[in-house]
Image: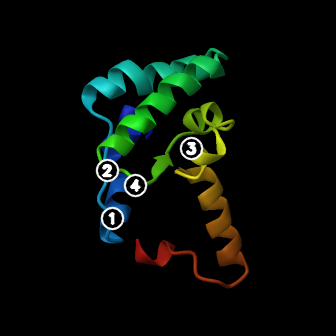
Amino acid sequence: MGTAGMLHTGIYQRFLQRSGYTCVLPSESEMAELVMPSIVSVKAGDLGAANRTLSDAARRLGERGARMVVLGCTEITLALADASPEAAGLYVHSTAALAQACLAWARGGQSGAEAT
């Protein structure tokens, strides 16, 4: 999940597909009714409303076969920071994943970025 612009770039989709994953994206109506309004809610300081609608969007993705949900923008990560332990296990926080990959690279390990 991310902004319409971020999803349009296909950056996550390309990498995931090259790694053998199938991407399940929010529908146009889910973007218009759930995801984008939630991002606006976060920017307005209403994390509770954003949490409810983004949780609904994530649930819908799961119903269509998603096993994990990439939280592809900062506002979504903030809104879902207090997710239940069950839900939190389904989320990939893109910023945290990037930080972990950077640390692994700095320590001389493989980060997975070599596949890009």
Residue tagged 4: 12
CB within 8 Å, label 4 to label 1: no
Badge number at residue 87: 3
Lower sequence index among marks 3 and 4: 4
Q: Secondary structure at mark 2?
A: loop
Residue in the picture at 41% in, 32% down: 57
Counting from the top left corner in percent of width and height, residue 78 is at: 65, 34
Task: Specify the amino acid type for callout 1.
Answer: Tyr
Residue in the picture at 60% in, 22% down: 42
Badge number at residue 65: 2
**Is residue 43 visible in this depiction of the protein?**
no
Task: Specify the amino acid type for callout 3.
Answer: Ala
Badge number at residue 101: none
Q: Nearer the viewer, mark 4 or mark 2?
A: 2
Lower sequence index among marks 4 and 1: 4
Lower sequence index among marks 2 and 1: 1
Gap between marks 2 and 1 measured at Cα: 12 Å
Q: Considering only vertical position in the picture, is 78 above or below 107?
A: above
Task: Specify the amino acid type for callout 4.
Answer: Tyr
Quadrant, the C terminus: bottom left
Q: Residue furthest front?
A: 86
Q: Secondary structure at mark 1?
A: loop
Q: Considering only vertical position in the picture, is 26 above or below 52?
A: below
Residue tagged 1: 21
Q: Nearer the viewer, mark 2 or mark 1?
A: 2
Gap between marks 2 and 3 measured at Cα: 15 Å
Q: Considering only vertical position in the picture, is 70 above or below 3?
A: below
Lower sequence index among marks 4 and 2: 4
